Image: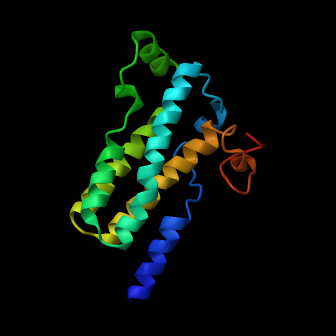
Amino acid sequence: MYYVNRKTFLILGMLCICVGPVNAQEAITTKNDLGLSPELIQLLRAEMRELLGGIQSIPVGIATADWESVATTSARIRGSYILEQELTPAQKKELDTGLPEYFKRLDSHFHLEAEKLEAAAVNHDAQLSAFHYHRLTETCTACHALYALSRFPGFSEEKTCPWRVNGT
């Protein structure tokens, strides 16, 4: 039984595969390039670098039952909203009007999954923690495949992202 759970965890933790968005057609019709100012792109990239460190540490925490670490890291991820950083009024307006609605929904889903992961860790539930970690990384993958192709060109192939239609 332990072997199956460990195998499941490894599959969930290591295979961050693409997942079809709830409304894939809307995502496909929005532009892949977010078209934000260079300053906002830099802020977004800085936040992504911070998130990456946390996301990379979670599988080890789950595998070693370090629930405090997983819960703390998940809480930090949940609270990392670029929209809550100190932005100028013009930058806030640019984010509010410039980001596609589907991007905003993916971001909201990402933070919700971080919250669910935190709760699973607080309850010392390895299986549920692994599940929510997987869902968290699915959201990363979907967003990168749709809105960051220039940074992650490997997502441009249809076989890596099944919801992409006709190269879009």
Q: Return the residue found at the far bottom.
A: 1
Is residue 100 left or right of 54 when viewed as pictured?
right
| Residue at position x 36%, y 68% in the image | 62
Q: Position of residue 56 (x, y in %)?
A: 46, 57
Q: Position of residue 59 (x, y in %)?
A: 42, 65
| Residue at position x 49%, y 42% in the image | 49
Name the image quarter holding the C terminus.
top right
Comparing 105 with 12, the one in front is: 12
| Residue at position x 52%, y 23% in the image | 40
Q: Return the residue found at the far left.
A: 123
Name the image quarter holding the N terminus.
bottom left
Q: Which image quadrant for residue 4? A: bottom left
Q: Which image quadrant for residue 3? A: bottom left
Number of marks: 0
| Residue at position x 49%, y 67% in the image | 12
Q: Position of residue 152 (x, y in %)?
A: 67, 44
Q: Position of residue 101 (x, y in %)?
A: 50, 29
> Looking at the image, can residue 99 be seen?
no
How are the colours assigned in the image?
rainbow
Q: Return the residue found at the far right.
A: 166
> Looking at the image, can residue 17 be seen?
yes
Q: Is residue 154 above or below residue 12?
A: above
Q: Is residue 44 above or below residue 119?
A: above
Q: Is residue 23 above or below residue 127?
A: above
